[in-house]
């Protein structure tokens, strides 16, 4: 059977669908992933600029990158792939989205259960005193500082070297282990512990559908139903098959 038909059959026969998404699902919304040539991450090495030790050492240096990131993320809209996941929910499926993205596009697309595994870009947190604020309250011509202790705020995103929120991690693990089909869309599956979630599903014998431009370490190790191509195009085809359009 054609792979897309096989994937659509699995989805049709599933009530509970858990989806892990990565930067690739948002590329067609105009947000480059880690690999895109000429993107933010070819200018700033993420393992240097997005490491918590770098922020502690020199928050002003890291904010140079954060300001550019803010400009890239501002005003971006969900694309057909994000919307397709909302459509699965509209078809009566219980869809849990675990996203590594900080862009909030799944929430904007209208999905009701979204675990933002690596946090969100528009919330600010003070790593000294724990105070919180919204980035919308600041014009970013200057670096936002905590109004209580005056330390530079950090966006509430999980930097390399920081732990994942315990509750989100627990709920994500549960969703990975308790679904009928697990989908992985647009992730290179190299950032842990998120990359481990498909393994949890696999160990429970849950089938895995993978959507990506290229194969990943998961493709052969977890024997995924690998749908190769742009997330928008594949998800469009998949929804059409599921709804028999
Ligand atoms: P990654 O950049 O390592 O990998 C992206 C993957 O998406 C690659 O495997 C690539 O082949 C695939 N891809 C690219 N364009 C695609 C498309 N149009 N359709 C389908 N697949 C496509 O990203 P990652 O695995 O998410 O992990 C890196 C980290 O980057 C995450 O922690 C995430 O928080 C962070 N990040 C987030 C954003 C965002 O919020 N949109 C953007 C860049 C990086």
Image (cartoon, rainbow, N blue to C red):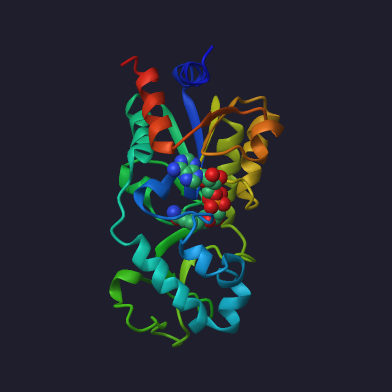
Position of residue 112 measured from the top left corner of the image (x, y, whole percent) = 37, 41
Residue 237 vs 188, above or below: the answer is: above
Q: Is residue 66 left or right of residue 84?
A: right
Position of residue 226 measured from the top left corner of the image (x, y, whole percent) = 57, 29
Residue located at (46% from left, 77% from top):
63
Residue located at (53% from left, 56% from top):
34
Position of residue 145 measured from the top left corner of the image (x, y, whole percent) = 41, 83
For the residue pair 176 and 32, the one nearer the viewer reads as 32
For the residue pair 130 and 122, the one nearer the viewer reads as 122
The image quadrant that residue 243 belongs to is top left
Q: Quadrant of the C terminus?
A: top left
For the residue pair 41 and 221, the one nearer the viewer reads as 41
Q: Residue furthest bottom?
A: 150
Q: Is residue 5 left or right of residue 70?
A: right
Q: Is residue 233 visible?
A: yes
Residue 208 vs 185, above or below: the answer is: above
Q: Is residue 98 visible?
A: no
């Amino acid at each position: 059977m054609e792979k897309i038909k096989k994937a659509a059959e699995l989805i049709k026969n599933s009530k509970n669908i858990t989806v892990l998404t990565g930067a690739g699902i948002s590329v067609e919304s105009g947000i480059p992933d880690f690999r895109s040539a000429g993107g933010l991450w070819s200018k700033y090495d993420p393992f240097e600029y997005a490491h918590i030790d770098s922020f502690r050492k020199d928050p002003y240096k890291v904010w140079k990158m954060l300001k550019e990131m803010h400009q890239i993320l501002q005003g971006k809209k969900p694309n057909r792939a994000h919307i397709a996941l909302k459509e699965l929910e509209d078809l009566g499926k219980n869809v849990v989205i675990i996203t590594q993205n900080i862009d909030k596009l799944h929430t904007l697309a209208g999905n009701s259960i979204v675990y933002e595994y690596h946090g969100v870009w528009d919330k600010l947190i003070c790593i000294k005193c724990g105070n919180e604020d919204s980035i919308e309250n600041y014009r970013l011509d200057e670096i936002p500082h905590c109004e209580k202790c005056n330390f530079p705020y950090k966006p509430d995103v999980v930097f390399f070297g920081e732990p994942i929120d315990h509750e989100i991690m627990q709920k994500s693990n549960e969703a990975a282990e308790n679904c009928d089909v697990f989908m992985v869309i647009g992730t290179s599956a190299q950032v842990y512990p998120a990359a481990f979630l498909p393994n949890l599903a696999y160990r429970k014998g849950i089938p895995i559908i993978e959507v990506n431009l290229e194969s990943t370490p998961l493709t052969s190790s977890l024997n995924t139903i690998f749908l190769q191509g742009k997330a928008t195009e594949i998800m469009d085809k998949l929804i059409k098959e599921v709804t028999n359009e």
